Amino acid sequence: MTRDENHGDEDHGPVGDEIEEAEAVCDGLGDALRAHGITLPSLCVDAGPAHALASVAPPLVEPGRCNVETARALTVALAPDTASGAAR
């Protein structure tokens, strides 16, 4: 779902491991959001610049853009549970 088309499925050593980790985290975030009924259609991994620069700019999870309704749903899902008396 999140693999950058320019990187394919090849093993790229430590950089490939970082990309795979970012993809796993991205997938987990998508699963967690869907559990709250939230979908970020643009959620993906930005693998960053050429592999030679990977130590300077590791892959990023890009949540993408969302509409106001989705932003509200994220705010509610991430808000502390006031019913349980959780500290803010």
Image (spheres, rainbow, N blue to C red):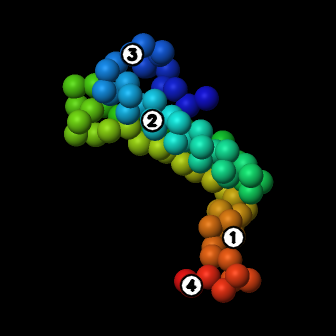
Res. 64 visible in picture: no
Amino acid type at circle 3 is Asp
Which residue carries the number 4 mark?
87
Q: Residue at x 64, y 45 (%)?
A: 30
In depth, the one of 73 and 25 nearer the eye is: 25
* Disc 1 element: helix
Q: Identify the residue under disc 2.
A: 21
Q: Decide: is 11 above or below 14.
A: above
Is any part of residue 79 visible from this angle? yes
Residue count near mark 2 (Cα–Cα under 10 Å), binned few <14, some 14–19, many ≥20: some
Q: Which residue is mark 3?
A: 11
Q: Residue at x 52, y 26 (%)?
A: 3
Compared with residue 82, is residue 31 higher up or lower down, i.e. above or below?
A: above
Crowding at dot 3, Cα within 10 Å, few <14 / some 14-19 / many 20+, comes out as few
Q: Which residue is mark 1?
A: 76
Determine the CA span between mark 1 and mark 3. Answer: 39 Å
